[in-house]
Amino acid sequence: MLILAIILFGMVAGALAQMVLGQSMRDVNWTIAIVTGLLGSFVGGLLASLLAGDGLELRPSGIIGSFVGALLLTLAWGWYDKRRA
């Protein structure tokens, strides 16, 4: 059950990152949303939680870090995709 919640949270964080960057809800690439959300949650959430001194518990600093991580990875993916095309 926890794994499903982590995947769902990552998908939501990745989709929100894409929508902040200007895509509409129906234009969200869900594969990219899941990947960037999970990786952003791992890297950004872990880093923000450890820097804030919260440890590995679920705290607002980790949630904000997860979103910021997903946002940065989505920006990097968009840059890479445009450069490749």
Image (cartoon, rainbow, N blue to C red):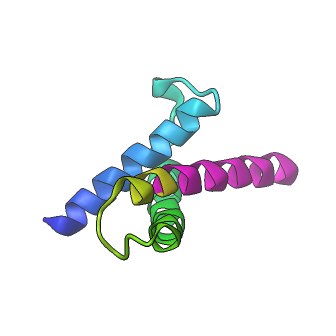
Find the magenta span and give its range: 66-85
Q: Quick check: 19 above or below 79?
A: above
Q: Return the residue found at the far left.
A: 1
Q: Quick check: 4 above or below 21?
A: below
User: Is residue 77 part of the magenta span, yes or no?
Assistant: yes
Q: Residue at x 38, y 44 (%)?
A: 12
Q: Position of residue 78 (x, y in %)?
A: 72, 46
Q: Residue at x 56, y 51 (%)?
A: 68
Q: Residue at x 13, y 65 (%)?
A: 1
**Image position of 33 (left or right of 81):** left
User: Is residue 84 part of the magenta span, yes or no?
Assistant: yes
Q: Return the residue found at the far front.
A: 53
Q: How many marks?
A: 0
Q: Position of residue 67 (x, y in %)?
A: 50, 49
Q: Position of residue 19 (x, y in %)?
A: 54, 31
Q: Residue at x 23, y 68 (%)?
A: 3
Occupied quadrant, residue 53: bottom left
- In the foreground, 52 or 67: 52
Question: Magenta stretch mostly in which secondary structure?
Answer: helix
Occupied quadrant, residue 17: top right
Q: Position of residue 6 (x, y in %)?
A: 29, 61
- In the foreground, 36 or 42: 42
